[in-house]
Amino acid sequence: MKSTLRCFIGIVLFISMAMANDFDEAVKAYDSGDYTKATELFQKACDGGDTSGCYNLGGMYRRGYAIEQDYLKAAKAYEKACNGGMVESCDNLGLMYSDGSVKQDYQKAIKAFEKACNKGFVAGCNNLGTLYQSGEGVKQDYSKAARLYEKACNGKNALGCHNLAFMYANGYGVKQDHSKAIKTYEKACDGGEDKGCYSLGFIYANGRGVEKDEVKASKYYDEACDKGSAWGCYNLGLMYYDDKAIKRDYLKAAELFQKACDGGDAYGCDILGRMFEKDAEDINGALFYYGKACYLQAQRSCEEYERLKK
């Protein structure tokens, strides 16, 4: 019996080492840019029961690295990893069911987010909170959404902090408290969430629950812009353009509007169109930016584009 047990343990260890080798080799292939080989090895590791292999295989199919993008195969791989205890996969699976990457199914999304959240993956708590806030797949419940955002925020999820701050700022599911909103937005901003920095800029620029302070607003818009917020870049650009709290600098304003426009902000593109038309008297430049803003659904820019085309 002991001999049989030793033999069984030896087989298990051999299989485990083989799975680990497949996964390690897959990571090496991925890091070297050989995505085709990496996919094959992640598949092999996943087939052998390695949840990390399944998780990474899901990512390859979801993003279409060296293989045809296939959301169904991605979801299948994430589900296998999730069932094997990898909570990050549960969260990704929930996102795919909620955003419609696969057939939209809010009930499945909720179950996946709950599994991630209950096992300590706080991004799942935040994502579950968004469903309770919007009432998608569940009865709308601001109080529950706020509790989930709080759990995410306490777990250092910066987006969860931003969402919780929004609840405090507007009195959704919690008593309205501008002081708590600002502190929580600060936590989000300090945690790297550009929306938190932008929201602080907006609060101080408009005096929402605090004394209006355009110097502080410019600081937070600048930080938001650096973190990738197109709105932060646009609003900071306006401060340079309008000589608000910052010395007027049209070149700096144009640079910021360009960053906003490149980031998909229609207003940034629109104001560049106006600058090219009125300041530089460059009709071709104006047409380019009005056209881009129009593509981004800015109706005024569409009208300006048509006017200049005549």
Image: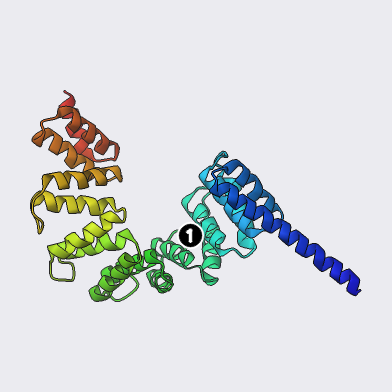
**Which residue does the image show at 13% across and 38% down from the upper left?**
275
* Residue 271 position in % (x across, y down): 17, 42
Specify whether 229 is left or right of 126: left
How many badges with numbers are in the image? Answer: 1
Q: Quadrant of residue 298?
A: top left
Q: 138 or 236: which is nearer to us?
A: 236
Label 1 crowding class (10 Å Cα cut-off): few <14, some 14-19, many 20+?
A: some
Quarter where residue 9 is shown: bottom right
- Work out whether 59 lies above or below 84: above
Q: Quick check: 181 left or right of 39?
A: left
Would residue 182 be visible to someone looking at this image? yes
Image coordinates of residue 85 in percent, x first then y, are 62, 65
Q: Which residue is mark 1?
A: 137
Q: Amino acid at mark 1?
A: Gly
Query: Can residue 46 be seen?
Result: no
Rendered view: 153 above or below 81: below
Residue at horizontal 49 percent and vertical 55 percent from the top? 95
- Write the residue at 64% across / 51% down: 25
Quarter the N terminus occupies: bottom right
Residue 288 image position (x, y, % from top left):
23, 32
Residue drawn at point x = 31 percent, y = 56 percent? 227
Q: Is residue 46 left or right of residue 63?
A: right
Quarter of the image for the C terminus: give it: top left
